[in-house]
Amino acid sequence: MSEIATHCPYCALQCGTTISGTDTATVAVRPADFPVNRGGLCQKGWTAPEVLRAPDRLTRPLLRDRTGRLSPASWDDALDLVAERLLRLRSDHGPDAVAVFGSGALTNEKAYLLGKFARVALGTSRIDYNGRFCMSAAATAGNAAFGLDRGLPFPITDLGRASAVLLAGANVAETMPPLMQHLEQAALVVIDPRPSATAARAALHLRNTPGTDLVLALGLTHVAVVDGLVDEEYVRRRTQGFADAAGPVMSWWPERVEQVTGVPAADLQRATHLLAEAGNAYILTGRGAEQHRDGTGTVSAFINLALALGLPGTPGSGYGCLTGQGNGQGGREHGQKADQLPGYRSITDPADREHVARVWDVDPGRLPGAGVGAYQLLDSLGRDGGPRGLLVFGSNPAVSAPHAAHITRRLRSLDLLVVADFLPSETAALADVVLPVAQWAEEEGTMTSLEGRVLRRRALLPPPGQARDELRVLHDLAARLGQPPERFPATARPVFDELRAASRGGRADYSGISYDRLDAGEALHWPCPDGATAHPGTPRLFLESFAHPGGRARFVPVEHRGPAEPTSDRFPLYATTGRVLAHYQSGTQTRRVAELTGVLAEPFVQVHPDTAARSGLTEHGLARVRSARGTMTARVRCDAGMRLDTVFVPFHFPAGGRANLFTDPATDPACGMPAFKVCAVRLEPETA
């Protein structure tokens, strides 16, 4: 029986696993003694092989026929059609008439080649990816403060020695269960509007009003300043801009913060002292703090708190953001983002453009400029001046995008929608062409975990039926678009070698990392430049200096703006959305696993019993959650720990159970992050 070492296909922990089997029916998984999971897996990881066995697995290309049905076709017919229509759209409307939408689930090699394909084979600036909905706020804030964005600038195992950890908007007990073993020794301070599984384990739960995380961060920093808890020597030696950032902080005294957030002033003071007086402390942010129209400012405020306490770059302490998707880190480093080139280079920087163009053997002047963020891209589909064709790789925006009914209409308005996926997602159901591709156990490549460690993904089996690896798809399609075939390698190793060259000298430098080193078992974190001797990688960043010129971290002044959509008489409740233990992202994979749907088969709305009663709802009954944009239906789940003004809905479900039917598409102007975590709604009984 074949057996390989690889990693879980789900979140950015990238838990180590061993998988074995001779065919799809016999594939089994067991956890490895890997540093992040130490022989454990969550329920999703244990059941991952079931997705390989999904009865509706895509194994043949599909074309929409004259009757409107998706019917099987040959690869030649499918790719010939796609190429012909792409060329026609470009000829008739220009290169930006075609767009590409990628994914934080793609390997580094696929993310890299997809960005190259968009900019070289298609010549379009219209490329972005679903990671815009996940990591953009933290990435923007991290770059501003530190000059570099890596989710955790230290190994996860460092958390095991922490005395105190602040989790701002992160329910890791459900979204990353193996991480909890690294937090067992720490006193946890959890910021979350609802009584999450993580909050249940906290020494202190700050249950704030949705949309007020930034105010909490300002208040915590206020207490640090007033109570003399600022590490003044660290601030003087390693940072700049403290005085400018302290100005807005001073207007947020604890009692005022309590009025806005609902968090008692005494708890605010206790939390600040707990962090400041701990021997080793960490501040970690998650989507709850980031998915707001002021998400960048919110993360900046928490980084300011961390800097004031002297945490970043101090051994045994630090700040980090908890990257969500499996390759959410690598996926944002190598060219899928609208404004980036590989190696975390900027597409607007002449030197960066010249370097990458030289690797790609093209004229730098032919590379398009920056595009637009994910929501703006999806919103522009089919409009005058917007893309008329879209290629989607590994994403399901019909479920995952905010204002989902509107985005679905935009997808339907396209002249050409091509979806490459291994399961018939809700977005694939709208497509003109569906291309069947490989899953995690069928592909070679690399992933980059939330701590910046580059990991090998290995294939146990070939893809079933006629399914192909995405690298082969891009290779074949590029050739049909007139590109030299050798410009788009069809296998992972040569693509990675080219990625190394493209990233050389960039902020995310992979040039010293090779398949040989990874296969030999080396633990390599970027940056890892090449040189005369093998670089050991950089597991801990910022110990000596930050990545800005001069080596200092930068405080960023921030002001509170509040949610884009306040509550009103018509919509008197705040709604917030998120993940739950049994499911992942849009649910395309986990909703096909019987063990997981046995835990949760339908969406629910978590609500305080008194709020439910005032809305005419009963436990286990059906409710409509209605906003100014739309309505979804969910099963009522009463919880006396909920705030009276807040409801929670998971976002993993399709059709009328899509939480994103009601979410607010208002975006953060600094990064394009939508306001998934707060909008105004009302509850109504569902009537037959």
Image (spheres, grey):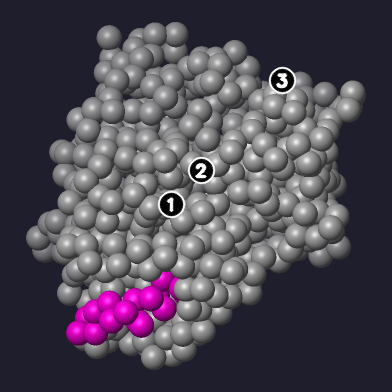
Mark 2 neighbour class, 10 Å CA radius: few under 14, some 14 to 19, many 20 or more = some
The answer to whether the residues at label 3 and label 2 have Cβ atoms under 8 Å apart is: no
Instruction: Identify the mark at residue 479; answer none if there is no mark.
Output: none
Q: Earlier in the sequence, mark 1 or mark 2?
A: 2
Q: Position of residue 115 (x, y in %)?
A: 53, 55
Q: Identify the magenta region.
A: 217-234
What amino acid is found at the position of numbered circle 3 in the picture? Pro
Question: In the image, is 650 to the left or to the right of 376?
Answer: left
Q: Which secondary structure, mark 3?
A: strand
Q: Position of residue 82 (x, y in %)?
A: 71, 40
Q: Is residue 549 visible?
A: no
Q: Secondary structure at mark 1?
A: strand
Q: CA distance from mark 3 to mark 1?
A: 53 Å
The one nearer the camera, 204 or 179, is 204
Q: Are marks 1 and 2 in contact (CB under 8 Å)?
A: yes
On the image, numbered disc 1 is attached to which residue? 205
Q: On the rendered image, what quadrant is the C terminus found in?
A: top right
The image shows residue 261 at horizontal and vertical percentages of 56, 64
Does residue 227 belong to the magenta stretch? yes
Q: Kindly report the secondary structure that dominates the magenta region of the rendered protein.
A: helix
Residue 521 placement: quadrant? top left
Q: Which residue is mark 2?
A: 195
Q: Residues within 10 Å of mark 1 (few under 14, many from 20)?
A: many
Q: Nearer the viewer, residue 352 or 521?
A: 521
Residue 467, image x, y percentages: 55, 24
| Disc nearer the start of the sequence (3/1) | 3
Q: Which residue is mark 3?
A: 72
342 vs 350: above or below: above
